[in-house]
Amino acid sequence: MTSTVEVNGTSQKMATMWHQQVFALDAKYNTSRANKLSSLGMLYIRRRNQLLREKLSADPEIGALYLKLRSELLRRRYGEQQERNSTGSHTISEESSERRTKHHTIQRKSTAENFAFAGVHHIFEQHKAAVTMLKFANNDRSRLCCASLDGTLSICEVVGTPPRVTALLEGHCNGVTAFDWSISNDLIVSSSLDTTIRLWRVCVEPSCLRVVNDQQRAEVLCCSFIPANNNLIVAGNSQGLIQVLNVSTGIYTRGGSCKIGGKILSLTCEGSGGSVIWAGNDRGIIVSFRLEPGIGRLTKLQRVQETGGMVTSLSWRSWLSKDAPWSALLVSSACNAVLLYRVADSHGSLCFWRKYPIKHRYYPLRSTFCPQMGACLIATGSEDGAVHLLDSAREGKSAKVDRLHGHATSTLALSFNYDESLLASADHDGLIIIWRNHQRHL
């Protein structure tokens, strides 16, 4: 019996690997296949994915032969140059020269040209319910973590050949609402509707290190590591309680809890060793707190109540720009808009800066800044199913850089890798699309 299970498991694993290899090959040529109509290319690649899942071959010899023939047909149809560029077969000296040329070219190009996320790099479908959050590991261009309402987290290697799911973190008894990577990327903390916070080790053999119940046995809706002290995490629950937990001991810190009411849907921390935290709830209220990183004590600072809808996402960044020499807070609010605030002082006070219309009323959409400090790009999900790219240096219609079409349902989560060569987006059905920036080298 055990032998049969092992054989079946091996066959399934080989079939899945074959599926990923064939799909990666098709995705590689998708830009050439539909270079004038991206929606047609997306329709083709999704249909190919469906057919591959329905026609998985259990015979490894047949699978290998099919892959070889398919590769040859695509090479003949679209040319050798596409194959060579995609597999990175050029020499190191050529690559160095190419990167220098691209670097100077990118600096001269417009924001729209610099962020040409037109092609699909890969599609993942490992989750059976809405994906609530995506995040690339810190300073990592390949490892992507995904959280889903199916109760699992997955870790993907998106730059490999083929891109693949490398780990599935199972243990939560209900939907996973949020997670965060530790600074060293060896730990992940996650929050869930099952009223627990879990700490996962992901550096070697992925495993759950600790399970901590919410203080009020309430659903935990958001969580984040404290940048200045990764022994501490901050979390928010459905009873309006923000709380600081020492994950090394599994004990909530003394003086580290504060109630703001409603359901706390989003959190963000001031980076670079800062001590200000912002929390947003379902009543459209944003509250700032002072955290003492050494002991985990919280002090309430400021309150903003003018967003007009539930605050489903908060992102902080320090701006390096002559036009905006201040920190900024990006807010996804269910008032059909993405809001940009200027952080006015050390107390986390917010001054309204700009507003961008986005279809957002019902779902917990997320938005994010691009990681490069000198750029002004914002990416946001939308209930129209598109990923919207916005130039925060502009206002009105001129702020629209691009829209990426490919999701059939509301786009909930998204994340850039650190060098902006890839953008990941996920939707209400659990589909994850990896978009490739053709101005960046993979």
Image (cartoon, rainbow, N blue to C red):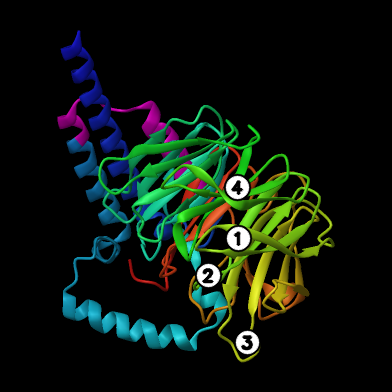
Label 4, secondary structure: give it. Answer: strand
Residue 379 in the figure: left or right of residue 201: right
Q: Give percent across and percent down for residue 295.
A: 52, 59
Q: Give percent across and percent down for residue 176.
A: 54, 38
Residue 332 in the figure: left or right of residue 207: right
Magenta stretch: give its range: 41-63
Amino acid on which the number 2 mark rests in the picture: Gly
Q: In which quarter of the image is the C terminus?
A: bottom left
Q: Is the magenta stretch mostly helix, strand or loop?
A: helix
Q: Name the residue furthest top.
A: 1
Amino acid on which the number 3 mark rests in the picture: Pro
Residue at image location 35% in from the left, 55% down from the top: 28
Amino acid on which the number 1 mark rests in the picture: Thr
Q: Are marks 3 and 4 in contact (CB under 8 Å)?
A: no
Q: Do the residues labelled 1 and 4 touch (CB within 8 Å)?
A: no
- What residue is disc 1 on? 268
* Image quarter of residue 398: bottom right
Q: Nearer the viewer, mark 3 or mark 1?
A: 1
- Neighbor class of circle 1 (other Cα within 10 Å; few <14, some 14-19, many 20+) is many
Residue 103, compared with residue 137, is above or below; it is below
- What residue is disc 3 on? 325
Q: In which quarter of the image is the N terminus?
A: top left
Nearer to us in this view, 374 or 399? 374
Q: Give percent across and percent down for residue 341.
A: 72, 72
Nearer to us in this view, 295 or 379? 295
Nearer to us in this view, 58 or 393? 393
**Tag shown at residue 271:** 2
**Tag shown at residue 222:** 4
* Image quarter of residue 342: bottom right
Q: Are marks 2 and 4 in contact (CB under 8 Å)?
A: no
Can the viewer see residue 408? no
Q: Earlier in the sequence, mark 3 or mark 4?
A: 4
